[in-house]
Amino acid sequence: MGYAEQKLSEEKVFKDPVHRYVHVRDQVIWDLIGTKEFQRLRRIKQLGTTYLTFHGAEHSRFNHSLGVYEIIRRIVDDVFNGRPEWNKEDRLLSLCAALLHDLGHGPFSHSFEKVFDTDHEQYTQEIILGNTEVNDILSKVDHDFPKQVAEVIGKTSDNKLVISLISSQIDADRMDYLQRDAYFTGVSYGHFDMERILRVMRPQEDQVVIKQTGMHAVEDYIMSRYQMYWQVYFHPVTRSAEVILTKILQRVKELYQKSYSFKYFPIHFTSIFNSELVVEDYLKLDEAIILYYFQMWQEEDDEILKDLCKRFVNRNLFKYVEFDPAKEYKKLAELSVLFLKAGIDPDYYLVVDSSSDLPYDFYRPGEEEERLPIHLLMRNGENRELSRESEIVDAISGKRRTDHKLYFPGDFLQDDSTKRNIKKQIRTLLDYR
């Protein structure tokens, strides 16, 4: 028996609040979970700064990755097993891609990526293909196996069916994070009938389709996703924390480039600042490291860095007002001038933040493949695109909703003896009392 077929002498289980249990029978999966690269995901929060809004949102990408693996395991072992359209040789590839799909996420992923122009999917592939414990294990399956896993995660594989299980408009990734994030934030929006969806999933040559009888469960799933984005993921308080986090990282980068003398030198960031970031350095970054620096930088001489770190560590977040960039760009220019007159740097303390989501989209030729639509398998054997059958989905298909907010430090705008009139003008322009 080769390594790929090896089973544990006794099944291992992880107790899970969403799926009850995560089952591991394969030696390969058990070994991957034990690697230092996968264990690092315990130190990366799934929802970044959301814990500053929903105090229960402390769960990690480790939790989520196990959850995605478990959903895929149930699909390939229970739902697809024995179906002629399913190639059982793809089982381990599916399980490994599910488990490792988020391996390259950095600390506070999206803010980190925005400032330092990194891509977690690229780092996921580099970790899988590089000199790592994960690569050693995958290579024991087959010399070419790490490349196969990386290509599924990078959506460049010829195996479109396995890609659609991991990354599509109805995939194991989304089905886990919607339920998991709803559980840990304490909201009710993200719940849907996953059991029903799994039962009506069917493999085809290049995608997963849903039996027509499962349409209403899919409608529920899409609306759950819509509500989670606007009630949780795009919550304005969470976005305020992300704005401050982003500005801290930008300030540190700027100070480093100006040869500022740090009391607590950001040694873990130097390879990023010098555009020399390699996988080994990237893997040393986690949220414990980032928060350590934020704690220490509260003592820096630079007033902006010191203030922003105090705000983040102590949750003294920015206030916000609704803002329409298309109509209020002149107001933003006026506010920037007034902020400078008040001695407040608008580059760090006057920030427009935008959030946008497309809950469901039908096929648009030439656009990114993950927008391939959800297809219903009709009783006559034909496939029909979901929005053609569902009035609910048709009503939101292709309709992007965007929200803009203007963030600023409300405490800086309080009256004082020297800048009272300027600050009053700012508050009037912002309609902030």
Image: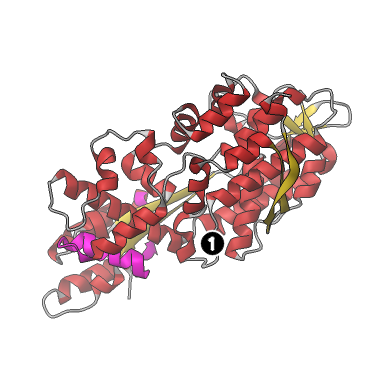
Q: Mark 1 belongs to which amino acid?
A: Ala
- The 10 Å Cα crowd at callout 1, few under 14, some 14 to 19, many 20 or more, is many
- The residue that disc 1 covers is 57
Residue 4 is one of the magenta-drawn residues: no
Q: Which residues are magenta?
A: 299-325
Instruction: Name the residue at the right extreme.
Output: 380
At horizontal 85% and vertical 26% (from top left) the residue drawn is: 381
The x and y percentages for residue 77 are 78, 36
Q: Is residue 428 left or right of residue 22?
A: left
The x and y percentages for residue 48 are 46, 55
At horizontal 44% and vertical 34% (from top left) the residue drawn is: 123
The x and y percentages for residue 247 are 29, 54
Residue nearest the viewer, comparing 254 with 332: 254
| Quarter of the figure with the N terminus | top right
Residue nearest the viewer, comparing 170 with 262: 262
Tell me the quarter of the picture where residue 227 sits.
Answer: bottom right
The x and y percentages for residue 345 are 19, 59
From where the camera sits, is residue 308 visible?
no
